[in-house]
């Protein structure tokens, strides 16, 4: 049963008010990233006052000062008041995760949240009423064609790929080390997008051949914008739903299953099972719900996001175990990483 609130919490709803203000905090961080604030603070040789920041970024002094003060309050920016004037400086967390130039930057993820996810969530009431995504109402695109909406322009494709790249830069290592994958010598990351997760796997298992299979336009964009000088991964153009799936020892499905309805996922997994080498397997990376439906909160929010943007949802481990078993896989293993995404491994 849920915990009973104390009388003091009932007298004044601190936690509820914190939740109600959550969107304001998110939008403050989004706006600071869009303005380039964190890059400016990182590159500055000294703390800056609001007037200096406003002049450089082309904003009002009053507006940027208020935004900076919010970021100070949530401990993303630091401040020191000298002779009555506030001087702002970046923090380690901002330098590492919010500045665009950092190797662990979440900048692209934040821009995608701000410019794509946030508008979709404005139509959450309609999504709950209708039981379908809001791509048509938000962007004027058919709700049935999910990736036509996500990839509706070259700019939008690049934003989405930036989101995925940011995700696996910080979560990828936990996924590829959740199990010992050294036995799998040929690996195909189906829908591997920018190649970020494939790179993490290739670094951890250098004797394995790792290939990203994705749509032609995605592969071309990945090679143009996300390729690295020391890349050991390969790319192959294809459509794993409509085209052939090449044979391999291990297939990765990272944030793929949660996009689609069960029938489509089952058909895909059976197709993978047929293509898979004997003794091979499939590695699924998704955010796992608890079986008792009490969280995690972040995953419940992800599932709500799947409602407004796709035709899928998040699931508990039992769902994946059943799905994989129905597709012919065996010995399903689950690893909760303690981070945003978890790992599931099953064998042919």
Image (cartoon, helix red, strand yellow):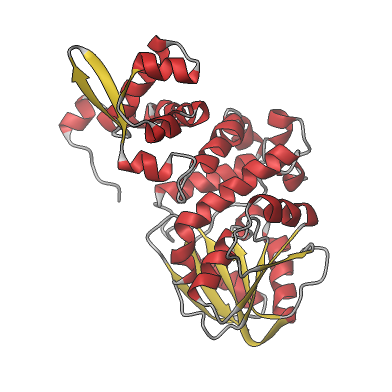
> Which picture quadrant has residue 64?
top left
Q: Is any part of residue 146 visible from this angle?
A: yes
Say which quadrant the C terminus sits in: bottom right
Q: Residue 133 location in percent, x, y?
A: 67, 40
Q: Is residue 149 left or right of residue 196?
A: right
Q: Is residue 245 left or right of residue 98?
A: right
Residue at the image point whose x is 60% and y is 61% from the top: 229
> As displayed, is residue 5 above or below residue 191?
above
Residue at the image point whose x is 44% and y is 72% from the top: 178
Between residues 98 and 326, which one lies in front from this camera angle?
98
Q: Residue 339 location in percent, x, y?
A: 40, 57
> As displayed, is residue 207 above or below residue 57?
below
Outermost bottom residue: 278
> As displayed, is residue 204 above or below residue 340?
below
Q: Residue 270 location in percent, x, y?
A: 72, 74
Between residues 122 and 125, which one lies in front from this camera angle?
122
């Amino acid at each position: 049963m849920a915990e009973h609130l104390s009388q003091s919490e009932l007298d004044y709803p601190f936690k509820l008010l914190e939740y109600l203000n959550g969107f304001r905090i998110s939008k403050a961080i989004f706006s600071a990233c869009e303005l380039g604030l964190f890059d400016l603070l990182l590159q500055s040789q000294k703390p800056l006052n609001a007037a200096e920041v406003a002049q450089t970024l082309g904003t009002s002094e009053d507006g940027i000062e208020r935004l900076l003060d919010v970021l100070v309050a949530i401990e993303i920016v630091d401040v020191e008041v000298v002779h009555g004037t506030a001087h702002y400086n970046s923090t380690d967390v901002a330098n590492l995760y919010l500045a665009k130039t950092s190797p662990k930057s979440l900048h692209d993820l934040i821009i995608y949240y701000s410019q794509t996810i946030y508008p979709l969530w404005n139509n959450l009431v309609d999504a709950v009423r209708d039981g379908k995504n809001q791509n048509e109402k938000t962007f004027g695109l058919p709700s049935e064609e999910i990736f036509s909406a996500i990839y509706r322009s070259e700019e939008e494709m690049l934003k989405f790929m930036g989101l995925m790249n940011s995700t696996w830069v910080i979560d990828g290592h936990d996924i590829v080390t959740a199990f010992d994958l050294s036995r799998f010598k040929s690996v195909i990351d189906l829908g591997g997008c920018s190649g970020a997760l494939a790179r993490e796997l290739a670094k951890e298992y250098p004797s394995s051949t790792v290939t990203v299979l994705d749509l032609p336009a995605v592969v071309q964009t990945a090679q143009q914008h996300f390729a690295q000088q020391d890349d050991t991964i390969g790319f192959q153009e294809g459509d794993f739903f409509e085209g052939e799936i090449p044979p391999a020892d291990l297939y990765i499905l990272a944030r793929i299953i949660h996009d689609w309805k069960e029938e489509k996922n089952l058909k895909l997994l059976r197709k993978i099972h047929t293509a898979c080498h004997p003794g091979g397997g499939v590695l699924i990376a998704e955010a796992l719900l608890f079986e008792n439906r009490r969280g995690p909160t972040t995953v419940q929010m992800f599932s709500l996001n799947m409602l407004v943007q796709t035709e899928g949802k998040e699931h508990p481990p039992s769902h994946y175990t059943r799905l994989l078993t129905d597709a012919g896989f065996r010995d399903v293993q689950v690893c909760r990483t303690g981070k945003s995404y978890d790992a599931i491994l099953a064998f042919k």
